[in-house]
Image (tube, rainbow, N blue to C red):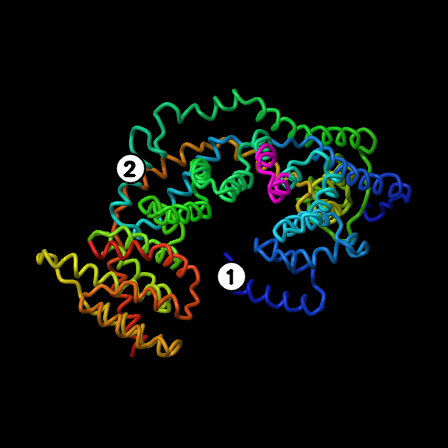
Amino acid sequence: MAEDLVLDTPIRDWVLIPLSVVMVLIGVLRYFVSKLMRSFQVPDPKIVKEGQVVVRARNLRAGANFIPPKSFRSRRFYFSNEENGLLHVPKGQSQNAQAAQMFSDPNMATDMMKKNLSMIIPQTLTFAWVNFFFSGFVAAKIPFPLTQRFRSMLQNGIDLSTVNVSYVSSRSWYFLNLFGLRGLFSLILGEENAVDDTQRMMQMGGFGFDPTKNLSAEKDSIDIIQHEWALPKFEQRAEAVLRKLVH
Amino acid sequence: MVTKTEETQLERLENQVDNGGGGAWEYLCLVGRLKLRRSEKVLKHGLSILNDPKKRSALGSEEWTLYEQVAIAALDCQSLDVSKDCIKVLRKGFPESKRVGRLEAMLLEAKGSWAEAEKAYSSLLEDNPLDQVVHKRKVAMAKAQGDISGAIEGLNKYLEIFMADHDAWRELAEIYVSLQMYKQAAFCYEELILSQPTVPLYHLAYADVLYTLGGLENLQAAKKYYASTIDLTGGKTTRALFGICLCTSAIGQLAKGRNKEEKESPELQSLAAAALEKDYKQRAPGKLSLVTTALKSLKSNCCTEEMLIWAHHSSDDDNSHATHLTMIHGPIQAQTIFQ
């Protein structure tokens, strides 16, 4: 029975192709809108400085053995003393810093909003549009058979268990386009500009990040370094090098 | 850092472009990416692309980057008119851009209208107080006007925030050396060694500063850093070899009074001396006798500092960075030893 299903050519002309074209156009439009809304925000000096402090402390940790003991000790004190060391985070500040910053800086919140809006609004609109006009269409057929498990992926919106799984419903075609057009966008809009929904969703997950934790972790590891000046060894090594050179 | 492969690629492209073999755009891209200073070539080849409408439009939006690159190169070559034209085109394309504003300020700076440039930079900083390039330009401008203390102040302020920027540390170190503020310079060089522990240049410069500071402890440390330079360069640094000899003799003099100091092995010095003689025999046979007598008298603990420095200077030593430091340190080193 399923083999007898014949797809009308107007379905191709009025459902399949328009749906794809609209999805591409919306992707392009969204790219330009987000480009318009992107605001340049001046980074917070404190955060920049903290990042730099961490880099420098990491350098100190890595290269500690290359500077004389006295220099090392003074640097360690500079980084990790309890009064005004660069890596010292006063108690109580670390926990609520992030939350306080969220509330005190409306820019951050609006920026998040903008990003989300540019993603959510067109998606809901197109989904509603597809649902309203094209619900229930069988829009295409893929040229190979698939198992029953693909039914929920390819025949979303058609509640018939007897139709062959290789037929694709219009709503499923919409989802396939939504997630599958990334390659096309990177062709049209340039490599980095591709609108990538999946990646954006992942970025949202990593939000609750606390920079002060970084500082105190770095402080702990600086505190436990055993300084052992590497330079005395170099005299012997230099001797060996020269001996080879002279003879 | 420029790697070996990039260097060979650059050389190949440079040859090809200079001989009219095309590839100018690739060359310019590479120079821009590696942040090299090839201003004259960039100016020449960049202009040839910009003046050719067909080639220029083939670049697409990269055209603007090229305009910027050429504008900066032109400033460096004192072709202010060219740079002015480029900036004008950019201004037309981006009427409100801060990046173009930076270029305009640089043009003012190149013209020597310091006050106006200062004003322009300050207004740029007001918009974005964390613009590293503008901060650095301000320091460079102070230095160009001879306002060394202003440059130091600017650098210190810059380093308070961007403390992981080793180029700035290096600049500060060199300024301190030029002002004979060796303790401060030593700190900066320590910072440089920390950030790039395997660059022999920093070890060498740090050793120089320590040696110049004098005192038994510093001299011993200096000797160690000269040794590490030798190890890192495979014994090819003439300056470090001389440094070893000088340090050993200076330490010998200072430690003469107190015998309880453990005897240092004299082998390193004799090896360094031998390496020096061999090196001079190969590269500057005419100066060999000079070096030999100087080294001999060093061994007998008689101060021959000036002779050594003179020999070093007149030798065809290709470590130009080293020579410039010698010129600064020369007289002071002599004093330390005479103490």
The residue under the point 57% across, 26% down is A108
Q: Quadrant of residue A116?
A: top right
Q: Is A73 positioned to the left or the right of B115 in the image?
A: left
Q: Is B292 positioned to the left or the right of B265 in the image?
A: right
| Chain designation of label 1 | B
Q: What distance separates the C-alpha of mark 2 from that of mark 1?
A: 36 Å
Q: Which residue is mark 2?
A: A77
Q: Quadrant of residue A23?
A: top right
- Above or below, comparing residue A80 to residue B295 in the picture: above
What secondary structure is found at the residue carrying circle 1?
Answer: loop
| Chain designation of label 2 | A
Along the line of sight, the residue nearer the viewer: B219 or B250: B250
**Pointer 1: residues within 10 angstroms few (<14), some, or many (20+)?**
few
Q: Is residue A177 magenta?
A: no
What secondary structure is found at the residue carrying circle 2?
Answer: helix
The residue under the point 90% across, 45% down is A9
- The mark found on residue B3 in the picture is 1
Q: Position of residue A79 (x, y in %)?
A: 33, 37
Q: Position of residue A30 (x, y in %)?
A: 73, 35
The residue under the point 63% across, 65% down is B14
Q: Quadrant of residue A165?
A: top right
> Can residue B262 be seen in the rendering of this structure?
yes
> Magenta region: which residues?
B105-120
